[in-house]
Image: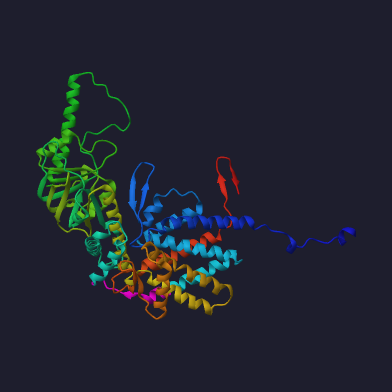
Amino acid sequence: MAAASRPRASKAESFVDNKRKEDIRSANINAGRAVADAVRTSLGPKGMDKMISTASGEVIITNDGATILNKMDVLQPAAKMMVELSKSQDSAAGDGTTTVVVLAGALLRVCQSLLASGIHPTVISDALHKSCYKSVDILTAMAVPVELTDKDSLVKSASTSLNSKVVSQYSTLLAPLAVDAVLSVIDPEKPEIVDLRDIKIVKKLGGTVDDTHTVNGLVFDKKVSHAAGGPTRMENANIAVIQFQISPPKTDIEQSIVVSDYTQMDRILKEERNYILGMIKKIKATGCNVLLIQKSILRDAVTDLSLHYLAKAKIMVIKDVERDEIEFVTKTLNCLPIANIEHFRAEKLGHADLVEEASLGDGKILKITGIKDMGRTTSVLVRGSNQLVLDEAERSLHDALCVVRCLVSKRFLIAGGGAPEIELSRQLGAWAKVLHGMEGYCVKSFAEALEVIPYTLAENAGLNPIAIVTELRNKHAQGEINAGINVRKGQITNILEENVVQPLLVSTSAITLATECVRMILKIDDIVTFHSKRFSCSI
């Protein structure tokens, strides 16, 4: 009876310690913000460059967000998510890799203040999700449609991407080059899909970036194998891409053969000669006069003896073609790779008007031009005075190609210079007033976070960010939706008239990916580390 009369402990009275969960969430947000702050100064055409020194001693100078974050040695799991976010933007749009990380950092900052106000993470997450969808609708309404026949608009968009790069002074050369390269590889049957693997960028040290040009054919950064005096120029070329070795076969297992008699040695050498000669006769019989040989890891692709016989047969040899280049080479030449000498047929050959070795700077390159029935591919030869400039020119050209690819898949342009972000901030702020309760408060914070882009653009350009953003907000309130920051003039202008444009896909992708990443970080309330060797875990 006494036991029955004892009061029971109510569940509502039990104490739950949420301090650890708050600490974990706060640590994750701070780690993400630290990564965003690291690349924030690189945003925009007046952004600073970063010098990255790798463990191997390699030095890279760039302001490409994806490259900077990729080379950073990040340990904290939430910070790694920011690195992956930049990679996702790079694969989805190709440009805006710094923007997406800066945007995510600003969202994390406002989320931290909302959490401190006592709002539950799930409420914040749901509000971010709704704000993201509303943002995409607003951006789509602002966008201007563009046709692929309007080459000027495509060049303007590619130029805007290049203006923030180290090689920005060469944007007038690289932008039209990127547009021509992408338009040349579009398949009429699939007009909305561009595979950038059909555009091969070949880097060659020497000259300046001004010497960069497209080649209607194939370019290899290697010279012809003419150790035995073989030809270095071939007109009316019949080209074979082979994946086997023109050298004596080896045994399947590692073993030593002891030859104690000179007659046996002569017999082995004679058999080797006959074996190689037999292969070259079969190759010559098909009319082939140019051989592209895949790089071999098992044994030498060619020997001095085989090169001697190939030179006598007047067959040009280019060896050590990389395995991952074979698909591009065969698609360009419209031929089939040959894996065995028994499958060597004339119908598997590619045909070109000219294959020649050309001197370029200190080195040599190989050019194949006038290809018959050429596939939808193109090659770009990038030049640079030093390796740092050469690498950055390649990265910048890749970004420009990605921007044009975005316009092919989603044919809408939008103003740059912080104009879309301020317009989003204004319209979302007005929408937040219609919503009730915590949701409206969270949407208002999301709208304020978007102002980080124009604020940072002005800050990096050495302008007064508060005055510039206030004036920009005022212009948009008066209905000038394309008003943006002109960092060259240091004032607010109509950014569309200044030809500062970017694909709609870059902006929508940046906001969608940044919101997804922030929502994921918000939902994490604990970190569990497993130690597989001890079969235990630490919490």
Residue 490 covered by magenta stretch: no
Q: Position of residue 124 (x, y in %)?
A: 55, 67
Residue 184 lies left or right of residue 85; in this view the side is left
Q: In terms of image quadrants, where is residue 473?
A: bottom left
Residue at position x 87%, y 61% in the image: 4
Of residues 355 and 429, the one drawn nearer to the viewer in this rendering: 429
Of residues 204 and 490, the one drawn nearer to the viewer in this rendering: 490
Q: Position of residue 430 (x, y in %)?
A: 48, 78
User: Which part of the image, by quadrant, shows the N terminus?
Assistant: bottom right
Q: Is residue 350 above or below residue 301?
A: below
Q: In terms of image quadrants, where is residue 189?
A: bottom left
Q: Which residues are magenta?
A: 137-149
Q: Position of residue 200 (x, y in %)?
A: 25, 54
Of residues 134 and 19, the one drawn nearer to the viewer in this rendering: 19
Q: Residue furthest bottom?
A: 478
Q: Is residue 121 visible?
A: no
Residue 152 lies left or right of residue 517; in this view the side is left
Q: Is residue 377 visible?
A: yes
Q: Residue furthest right?
A: 1
Residue at position x 30%, y 66% in the image: 488
Total of numbered circles in the picture? 0
Residue 252 lies left or right of residue 351; in this view the side is right
Q: Position of residue 214 (x, y in %)?
A: 19, 57
Q: Is residue 508 above or below residue 267?
A: below
Q: In terms of image quadrants, where is residue 270?
A: top left
Residue at position x 52%, y 56% in the image: 30
Q: Residue furthest top?
A: 260
Of residues 180 and 331, the one drawn nearer to the viewer in this rendering: 180
